[in-house]
Image (cartoon, helix red, strand yellow):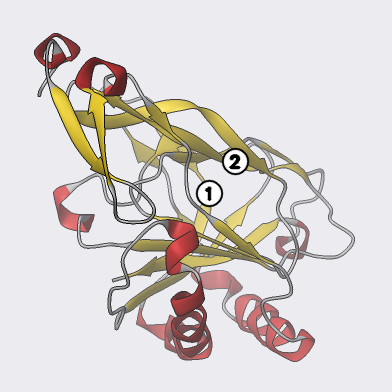
Amino acid sequence: MRAPADAAGRTLRLQGPAGDAIDVSAPDIAGLEIPPPYALIPDFLTDAELAQILAFTLAHAEGFQSAGAYEPSQTRLRSARLLDGPFNGPLAALVMPKLQALMPQLWPQLRIDPIPLNSLECQITAHGDGDFFATHTDNGAPDISYRRISYVYYFHRDPKQFSGGHLCLYNTLIQDGRGKCGQLAANIDPPRNGLMIFPTFIHHSVTPIQCASAALTDQRLTLNGWMF
């Protein structure tokens, strides 16, 4: 079915939680919004590990580059700075085993059958005053379709020196045979030393940041990336 009109007179057989079959009228499915599965893990790293990531970030402060992104219409989708590249290897080596150990208990919460995750992309993102990321998915282009799980670890200063920068997650709207961005479902104020994990197909955004200071340590800092 490619459009709601194709659903007329059809029935879909769905599998219930206990494995039983449930017959549902197809028109009742068209336009359905599915809440985004995600997990928020508090106190993900030790204080020493958090300090290690912050020290690495400050030691490589000159390596940050603009992360501006644009739609074909030249509408700006993103404003931020990235620390990316192979020199992030020590950070990947720090978080990868922890993420792999965590995932077995999260698969049911993420509503995904267990899959092996043997590779990791890792970057540090700094959002300062006026920065943002418009609504997008993390696997929506052919060159990034291999990504399966998104993760975002927050390690900003305590007390926090910025406002805004919330991670917004949206329902998946089933329409025209595809998953599209639905209504806002979660508005997450960045939790220091907290980890957010969600499937890469989930639509999400970062709200604009207000930050009076230009110091890197006062900005919204994340260690983020994707597993596949």
Rendered view: 6 above or below 54: above
Rendered view: 210 above or below 150: above
Of 19 and 105, nearer the camera is: 19
Outermost residue to the right: 159
Q: Quadrant of the C terminus?
A: bottom left
Residue 221 spot, x, y in % from top left: 65, 62
Answer with mark 1 or mark 2, whichever residue precedes in sequence. Answer: 1
- The answer to whether marks 1 and 2 mark residues whose Cβ atoms lie closer than 8 Å is yes
**Looking at numbered disc 2 in the image, what kind of residue is underneath it?**
Asp
Residue 123 spot, x, y in % from top left: 46, 69
Q: Is residue 3 left or right of residue 162?
A: left
Of 127 and 17, nearer the camera is: 17
Q: Kindly indicate the quadrant of the structure image that contains residue 112.
A: bottom left
Residue 54 spot, x, y in % from top left: 69, 78
- Residue occupying the point 45% across, 63% down: 108
Cα separation between marks 1 and 2: 6 Å
Mark 2: few/some/many CA within 10 Å (<14, 14-19, 20+) = many
Residue 225 spot, x, y in % from top left: 43, 66
Judging by the rendered image, the residue that carries numbered circle 1 is 80
**Looking at numbered disc 1 in the image, what kind of residue is underneath it?**
Ala
- Residue occupying the point 29% across, 24% down: 29
- Residue occupying the point 37% across, 41% down: 69
Mark 1: few/some/many CA within 10 Å (<14, 14-19, 20+) = many
Q: Secondary structure at mark 1?
A: loop
Q: Kindly indicate the quadrant of the structure image that contains residue 12.
A: top left
Residue 133 seen in this snapshot: no
Residue 38 seen in this snapshot: yes
Judging by the rendered image, the residue that carries numbered circle 2 is 131
Res. 96 mark: none
